[in-house]
Amino acid sequence: MSLDVDERTDSGSRRPSGADRAQYGVCAFLALLGVLVIVDATGIAHTTSSTDPIGPRTVPVLLGVLLLVIAVVYIVDVARGGRAEPEAGEDVDLTNPIDWRTVLLLIGAFVVNAVLIEPLGWVISGALLFWGTAFALGNRHYLRNLAIAVALSLITFYAFAIGLGVNLPAGVLQGIL
Amino acid sequence: MDNLNHLLEGFAHVVTPMNLLLALIGVTIGTAVGVLPGIGPAMTVALLLPVTYGMEPTQAFIMFAGIFYGGMYGGSTTSILLNTPGESSSVVTAIEGNKMAKAGRAAQALATAAIGSFVAGTIGTLLLVLVAPLVVDFAVGLGAPDYFAIMLLSFIAVTAVLGSSRIRGFASLLVGLVIGIVGIDSVSGQQRLTFGVPQLADGIDVVVVAVGIFAVGEALWVAAHLRRKPAGVIPVGVPWMGREDWKRSWKPWLRGTAFGFPFGAMPAGGAEIPTFLSYATEKKLTKHPEQFGKGAIEGVAGPEAANNASAAGTLVPMLAIGLPTNATAAVMLAAFQSYGIQPGPLLFERESGLVWALIASLFIGNLLLLLLNLPLAPAWARLLRIPRPYLYAGIVFFASMGAYAVNAQPLDLFLLLTLGLIGFGMRRFGLPVLPLIVGVILGPRAELQGRRSLQLSGGELSGLLGGPVSYVIYAVIVLVLAWPLVRRYIVRPLVEQRA
């Protein structure tokens, strides 16, 4: 049960030494979200009545404006050298740069499950999800992981879908399970 | 003693073999999941929500009570044996607790944490029984403008008081509020931010938001920075305490409880401040100051009690006003809402049986935890060795299952991923998570109360100023917002003058 550490050669450590410029991306995200909310709000029929004098548009417009304001304030803060510490944790080692390969593999496993859950059913897609995530995180015991993944998805299917009545699709295995 | 009768009825409700079994399962799962590194109490409750979808509300909440305290207790085990606490409330426990464990006193550290949690949890729940009805009596008389002001205060408090950067806190809050308005506006029936997607008309389920931000966000964040060699776990036997340990622990337990409960019950109290206060107090009062920093038992006993008492305290505003003050309470509130139950002053009237069964099971869960955790500590310690790929694969697996199970639609899985990516970005850029969750949960209700107040005044903004309660709250909000200026131009000059 060891973690394989091979093939983890990231292109040097590019820790920004001074200002954390990637933060401007957050400002852009907030500003875009603000514009989106305002544009969407202008498309809402402005229905005010005596029981609802302010209507459904006011709050989204207010939030959109506030988002634009906070984006500007954020830009000023970043420009003046403001930064916040990334979150630490039990299994988080912040001395390394972000390992995008692992993150993208994990997202891939996630999307596979989201696409396949209805056609193939939870037992198959969930097993793929578990196996794929363990693979993404560097575990290379393929067969053992497959056994664990299938066992887990079968147990959860029987316990939750059949036992507790939770909504989980049977998919192609309908009638077999 | 009307409440006492209600509570006794609650106990009568819970003490059936089936319900006791559910409480036991809740406590066990809660502790097991809470012990797992990287999973705090809020994520524990969020991940386990789907387990209860098929149950009756009362049974579900009996289990939740166990999960709630179990998740809390599990976190302290992690911080004592691993020294890298997942949630900020356990940071203080780790300071002395891990030193004790390294010095071969892990058994005593776990014992004082377990018994201290039991003492604090029991006293805290008792205080909840006494205080909550008083808060309800107060809250029943409040009108829409007062509620609007209280929610505004809670927004300001979680963003401006907690966390290091106000700008980042407000950014997080605004994103949460935007997520909250997705769906059909409850007053006018107009669709907002649905982009013509029919599944979005009902809004984004709070469970999907919580699981996405906490669980998927955390898994992605860990994937980006996975510690290739997990921190060493200190082996431990069955927890026990000697006579001397008891003598040194009981006072810190009580003092910690006294710090924890009031802070937990305040809109921006949380568990961090009381645990730090308790630690500082014990350091000052101890007869063994030389041991502090090297593993003093008082430094575990006090903060652990404060942490648990604060958890009980958060239930007061959560149940009586419908106001979540920390992430765990926010997820509990989401659990209520997923059953179509709205916490608040009317809860004690309409769902009296449910509330008192919940409170009774908090007492029972606490007792079960004590009985369970002392002998099972070595087993929990073994959970800390779980290979990280399996741990996070399991988190993603259960998160996906839970999010899908809410509405049985694959779209929720894509929403979950999107929210997970937002959670990832927030961790990367140091944006606090709590304001977002509080914004999602309270945003729609704040809008409703605000619009209701303006309806009474015919659209005049003066309608937001309801009565004395809202005046006081707005004054507090102004003070909180102006505090940095006050400190800079009034407090600091005064201090300097004196110096």
Image (cartoon, coloured by chain):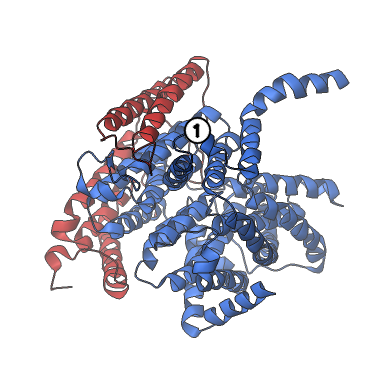
Chain colours: A red, B blue
* Quadrant containing the N terminus of chain B in the rendered view: bottom right
Q: Nearer the viewer, residue B200 or B221?
A: B200
- The amino acid sitting under disc 1 is Leu
Residue B69 visible to an observer of this rendering = yes
**In the rendered view, does B314 fall on the left or right side of A157?**
right
**In the rendered view, does B443 fall on the left or right side of B497?**
left
Element on which disc 1 rests: helix
Residue B386 visible to an observer of this rendering = no
Q: Is residue B102 above or below residue B349?
A: above
Please give the count of numbered marks on the rendered protein.
1
Q: Residue at x 70, y 69 (%)?
A: B240
* Quadrant containing the C terminus of chain B in the rendered view: top right
Q: Residue at x 23, y 46 (%)?
A: A111
Q: Residue at x 19, y 56 (%)?
A: A117
**In the rendered view, does B490 fall on the left or right side of B289?**
left
Q: Residue at x 66, y 28 (%)?
A: B483
Q: Which residue is mark 1?
A: B461
Q: Is residue A64 above or below residue B103?
A: above
Residue B130 placement: quadrant: bottom right
Q: Is residue B7 above or below residue B418?
A: below
Residue A36 x, y percent position in the rendering: 30, 29
Host chain of mark 1: B
